[in-house]
Amino acid sequence: MKILILNGPNLNLLGKRSPKIYGAMSMESLLIDIQQTWPDVFFHYEQTNHEGVLIDLLQQAVEINRVDGVIINPGGYGHTSVALRDAVEYVVEQAIPVVEVHISNILGREAFRHQSLLSDLCSYTIIGHGVNGYKEAVAHILTKH
């Protein structure tokens, strides 16, 4: 079982940026916890601040790496990028489950964050559960296989 965890812009600052919103745990610590929880699963993690790189990584997840599931926190691109939506749609068309994670409660924040362009494509969307949302996403993907 291979799962891609893909983080978008500014999530390289997890644990440093706005800890009241995003928490104090770094992604590195979370990844260690996830791997220890599911030692038989291969997790591949990528983070980028660049929209095109996110799209490339999603395409590679299908074409090269052939993952069994994708967990994506698109950051701000989830509210704005039709191109990212198209890449997620391609992954879903290949029968690979995609789970969208938002650490904060986007519905309780600024109005421009209320709509996600990805949610209707994803098999599951997790909003406002902090970094535990990533673990929920893994559990969801594992129930699909």
Image (cartoon, helix red, strand yellow):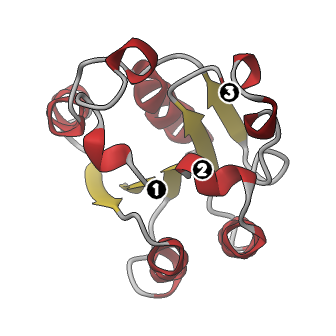
Residue at the bottom extreme? 63
Q: Label 1 amino acid?
A: Gly
| Residue on which disc 1 sits | 8
* Mark 3 to mark 2 CA distance (whole Å): 10 Å
* Horizontal and vertical percent position of residue 68: 49, 60
Please indicate whether residue 89 sits to the left or right of residue 59 in the image: right
**Residue drawn at point x = 29 percent, y = 56 percent:** 45
Q: Earlier along the polypeptide chain: callout 1 or callout 2?
A: 1
Label 1, residues with CA under 10 Å away: few <14, some 14-19, many ≥20: many
Of 16 and 82, the residue lying toward us: 16
Q: Are marks 1 and 2 in contact (CB under 8 Å)?
A: yes
Quadrant the N terminus occupies:
bottom left
* Mark 1 to mark 2 CA distance (whole Å): 8 Å
| Residue on which disc 2 sits | 76
Q: Earlier along the polypeptide chain: callout 3 or callout 2?
A: 2
Q: Which mark is residue 106?
A: 3
Please indicate whether residue 14 sits to the left or right of residue 86 in the image: left
Of 82 and 63, the residue lying toward us: 82
Of 55 and 112, the residue lying toward us: 112
Q: Are marks 3 and 2 in contact (CB under 8 Å)?
A: no
Label 3, residues with CA under 10 Å away: few <14, some 14-19, many ≥20: some
* Horizontal and vertical percent position of residue 140: 56, 32
Q: Nearer the viewer, mark 1 or mark 2?
A: 2
* Horizontal and vertical percent position of residue 93: 76, 72
Label 2, residues with CA under 10 Å away: few <14, some 14-19, many ≥20: some
Q: Against 18, is 20 above or below?
A: above
Q: Label 2 amino acid?
A: Gly
* Horizontal and vertical percent position of residue 34: 26, 32
Dot 1 falls on a residue whose secondary structure is loop
**Residue drawn at point x = 85 percent, y = 47 percent:** 120
**Residue drawn at point x = 61 percent, y = 43 percent:** 100
